[in-house]
Amino acid sequence: YQEQTSITAQWVNDWKNDSRLSECMNHVQLNNWVNVMENDNNELNRVYLERVKQESELPDYNIIDLRKEMISVYRQMVQHVEAHAVISGHKEFETFIGQVNVLIEKYNKLVKPAKKDDEPVAQS
């Protein structure tokens, strides 16, 4: 984006400051269009720089560590749900566990072709 906004800013600068180009713009009545282009380009650049600033302020995540933590939390959740199923005896838990297992199976089929041998795959 920076290269594009820089080029556009240079065009606008040339159109406004080069007397020959400026006369041509006046003649074909494109001054309003140039002003709109300049404003839009400046706004695009402002938004782009704001996004760059926001991205630079994001914490640096380690995906492998996050995945390990997520797997650990997932396993704790599974144990919690299974404990509730045993204690309460409600059929809803069995249904829920069955649905989760089907989703895991579908997920693993999607991930397996792209997965490396050392990557963990979700398990119930």
Image (cartoon, rainbow, N blue to C red):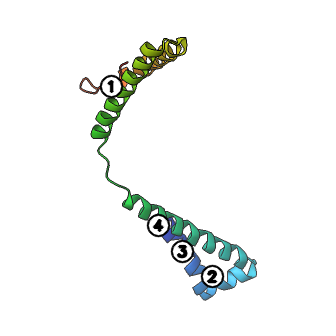
Q: Tell me which residue sits at (67%, 72%) in the image.
A: 36
Amino acid type, callout 1: Lys
Q: Residue furthest front?
A: 87
Residue 8 rendering spot, x and y as whole percentages: 55, 70
Residue assigned mark 4: 49
Amino acid type, callout 4: Leu
Q: Tell me which residue sits at (56%, 72%) in the image.
A: 42
Q: CA distance from mark 1 to mark 3?
A: 46 Å
Residue 84 rendering spot, x and y as whole percentages: 44, 19
Q: Nearer the viewer, mark 2 or mark 3?
A: 3
Callout 3: few (<14), some (14-19), or many (20+) C-alpha neighbours within 10 Å?
Answer: some
Q: CA distance from mark 4 to mark 2?
A: 30 Å
Answer yes or no: do the residues labelled 1 and 4 have beta carbons within 8 Å? no
Callout 2: few (<14), some (14-19), or many (20+) C-alpha neighbours within 10 Å?
Answer: few
Q: Tell me which residue sits at (37%, 61%) in the image.
A: 56
Q: Nearer the viewer, mark 1 or mark 3?
A: 1
Q: Work out whether mark 1 precedes mark 4 in sequence or the reverse, and give the earlier one.
A: 4
Residue assigned mark 1: 115
- Mark drawn on residue 9: 3
Q: Work out whether mark 1 precedes mark 3 in sequence or the reverse, and give the earlier one.
A: 3
